[in-house]
Image (tube, grey):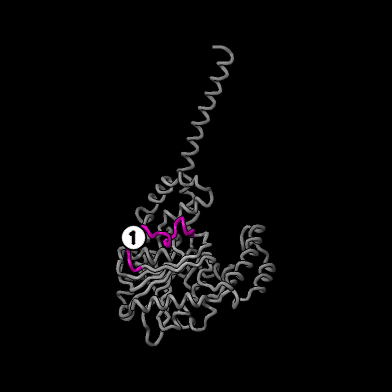
Amino acid sequence: MDEESEKQAARAARIKAGVALAKKLYALGSYYGPRIAQIAIFDHRGSDERTYFDSFEAHLFKTQKDFPALAKRKILHFFSGQNRLAAYLYETDAPKALLICAHGFTSLADGTGAIIQDYFLHRGYDVLAVDFTASGNSEGNSIGGMYQSAYDLHACLNFVHQDRKLSKLPILLLGHSWGGFGVCGVLNFDQSPKAVVEMSGYVSPDALMLAEAKSKAGPFAELTKPDMDAALKERAGTKGFLSAVSGINKARKTPVLLIQGGLDETVPVQDCSIFDQDAQIKNRHVEKLFYPKKHHEDIWYALDSCAYIAGFRKAEADLLAQYKKWANVPPETRRACYNLIDKEKSSQLDYPMMESIDHFFQKAL
């Protein structure tokens, strides 16, 4: 073998060794990456009262404490698996129905969704707001996964069916994000609700994981779906693949209203939203409301509030870029920021949307 041939052979050997190493590293990364990500995202509490009400979100928006009508309530408890969950019952004199409200990921029953609870309480509905597993005042060291909301709502419905007073009322469901998936996903197990309203919900936990991966790695993330699915199945079994659309189709006579914002980056319309599943939805009682200029967290606010919120979200993002975590922001800086916020401007409800939901519910009763 001449000298040039030896060099080519050596280069070929190095390339072969490099490719082999790359394959090994990819295999390690594709195995451990999804599992590490799930531990980081799910193996902790979603929220608790102290940290939530110290958060920027609780200072930016109205929460349960800002609504006098929500001061009077009954605290109820039921079990979901081994965890004792908390729920809050608000009652009217002659209720039309029982509206069960389901909060989003990292939120809680007393969070920003309280504005909706207040609205429907004043419209003559009893309202039951639930703290999901490892959220608010409910037990749990880990939220489990993005499927957990559906299983917690199943436990909640079983509790309601067994309660002498609550079981006499027609049941309605309303949920946002994690709760939006939950109110549709629970229909796989229980088709008793008379109507369901879903806001900004994802079609399944595995679809949400892929959409999140694509937001970080681009189209390349599609190649990792088998590895992500394997990690999810290892962690959650079939729960990780529970489908909101399957639930909607099983409850084929139940009216379902899907609400989505066009600027939602958390649950993108075309990647993983329930809203974009027309080809798979067979339930003929599905209706839709689309808001092109709304995001994930401002979906139920008036457009004036959305614009006001956006300015403070920019300030929050700038501070987080500098300090990494909100808790690291100096107290005097946080106070100065909070003092600029007017909750009357940030928390203007989208009344036409609420009226549409109320009308949708009343048609079903």
Q: Is residue 277 magenta?
A: yes
Give the residue drawn at x 43%, y 54%: 207
Would you say 138 lies left or right of 254 here? right
Would you say 138 lies left or right of 284 here? right
Give the residue drawn at x 62%, y 63%: 326
Q: Residue 45, relative to residue 1: is it above or below?
A: below
On the image, the x and y values in percent for residue 185 come to 37, 63
* Numbered label tally: 1
**Pick the front one: 326 or 180:** 180
Amino acid type for the residue under numbered disc 1: Ser
Give the residue drawn at x 33%, y 60%: 246
- Which residue carries the number 1 mark? 246
Q: Pick out the residue farthest to the top.
A: 1
In magenta, the rendered stretch is 267-285
Disc 1 packing (10 Å; few <14; some 14–19; many ≥20): many
Would you say 29 lies left or right of 182 here? right
On the image, the x and y values in percent for residue 135 come to 47, 66
Q: Pick out the residue farthest to the bottom.
A: 93
Q: Is residue 195 magenta?
A: no
Q: Residue 308, relative to residue 16: is it above or below?
A: below
Q: Is residue 138 visible?
A: no
Would you say 166 lies left or right of 293 here? left
Give the residue drawn at x 43%, y 45%: 227
On the image, the x and y values in percent for residue 89 come to 41, 78
Classified by dominant secondary structure, the portion drawn in magenta counts as loop
Q: Is residue 253 visible?
A: yes
On the image, the x and y values in percent for residue 122 come to 45, 83
Instruction: Work out which quarter of the rendered image holds the C terminus and state it.
Output: bottom left
Instruction: Work out which quarter of the rendered image holds the N terminus and state it.
Output: top right
Task: Say what secondary structure mark 1 lies in.
Answer: helix
